Structure formats: C-alpha cells, structure tokens
Amino acid sequence: MERTAIQDLGIVKETAPAFRDQALALIEDQKFEEALDKISHAVTLVPNEAEYHGLRGNIFQSLLRIKEARDAYAQALKCPVAANPPVAAIADRGGSPGAGSATPPTGNLVAENLKLCEKILADNTKKKQGGTASTPSALMQSSLQELLSAMQSQGRETEAVALMQKVGSTKEQVYAL
C-alpha cells in the first residue's frame, strides 16, 4: 500500500501527545530544560495546539525565562478555541489541577499567566531601567513571590518548589507563602 506525504504527516502529528506526556513527566522530575525540549517538539508538530504553547509557557516560567513565557502564552491565546481543552478533558487524561501533578494550563490560566508575565516584565524593567528580567537575580523579590503564588494556586507545586530551590528557599517556605 502506497502512503502519501499527508498520511505520513498525520502519523507524525499523532506523536505530539507523547511528547507532551514526556514533558509533563520531566516537569515532575524537575528537569525543565529537557521538558522544554519535548514540548517544543510537540509545538513543532502541531503548532495550533494551545495546550502545548501553554505548557511551554509554564516551563519557561519555571526557568524564569519570563519574556519567552509571555510569548508562549500569547501564542496559546492565538490558537483556535477548539484546540484549548477544558479542565475536564485534562483531568480525564489523569491530571488534576490543584493536586500537585503537572498539567497543561487551560484558557483562563493561560490568560492569567500572560498578564502575570507582562506585570513581572514591566515591574522589573522599571527597576532595572531597561534591563531584562530573565534570571533569578534580575527579578525583584515581589515578582518571585507573585510567580510562586500563581504556581501554587494553579497546582504547580513541583515547579514552585523547584523555583524556591533555585532562589535559595526551602520547601517549607514555599508552603508558608
């Protein structure tokens, strides 16, 4: 049976959810650079999938690459609405927002995270007089606290703990916020 390039492309696109799942597992293991690589493959295969762009934004946030997180969230909001699954669809795949497991963000969380990134960038740019806010040392403490609070309220505890470790705080301090 002869296969066409379109059929082959369809088969390749079917691998995108596997890349997403691998990214989610790597987030749980606090391997954010590797997770970014996996979700970037999914985005390349299915560029109009809001879920993949949103998850990529979350990973960028965890790496404190705030400009790139903002851009990923903005791209997620440009994707077709049908590509952005409701919370129930994510839960059906085994995720449970608020339970500590990594889950891709939904439309409302994407918009919330986009606004947070824009605020962090604006606040830190004002502080630095034109500098960037892409490293832990470049972010004001208040911005880190806002980011941690957002991660916790979204059930992204693994990411919050990793962020606190990156900036020198303990797990207990994360839960005290």
Image (cartoon, rainbow, N blue to C red):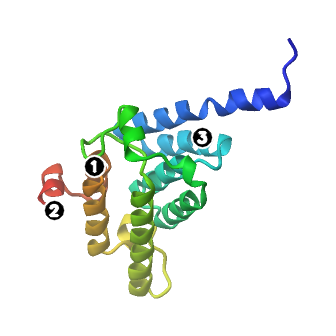
Query: Which residue lies under the disc numbered 3?
Result: 42
Q: Nearer the viewer, mark 2 or mark 3?
A: 3
Q: Secondary structure at mark 2?
A: loop
Residue located 24% across and 58% down the image: 168
Spatial separation of the CA atoms under disc 2 and disc 1: 14 Å
Query: Which residue lies under the disc numbered 2?
Result: 177
Q: Across the whole image, how many numbered discs are drawn on residues?
A: 3
Tag 1: residue type?
Answer: Gly
Q: Quadrant of the N terminus?
A: top right
Q: Secondary structure at mark 3?
A: helix
Residue located 28% across and 49% down the image: 155
The answer to whether residue 22 is left or right of residue 97 is right
Foreground pick, 55 / 169: 55
Residue located 35% across and 42% down the image: 102
Q: Earlier in the sequence, mark 2 or mark 1?
A: 1
Q: Residues within 10 Å of mark 1 (few under 14, many from 20)?
A: some
Q: Earlier in the sequence, mark 1 or mark 3?
A: 3
- Establish if 124 lies above or below 24: below
Spatial separation of the CA atoms under disc 1 and disc 3: 23 Å
Checking the image for residue 155, the label placed there is 1
Q: Secondary structure at mark 1?
A: loop
Residue located 48% across and 41% down the image: 35
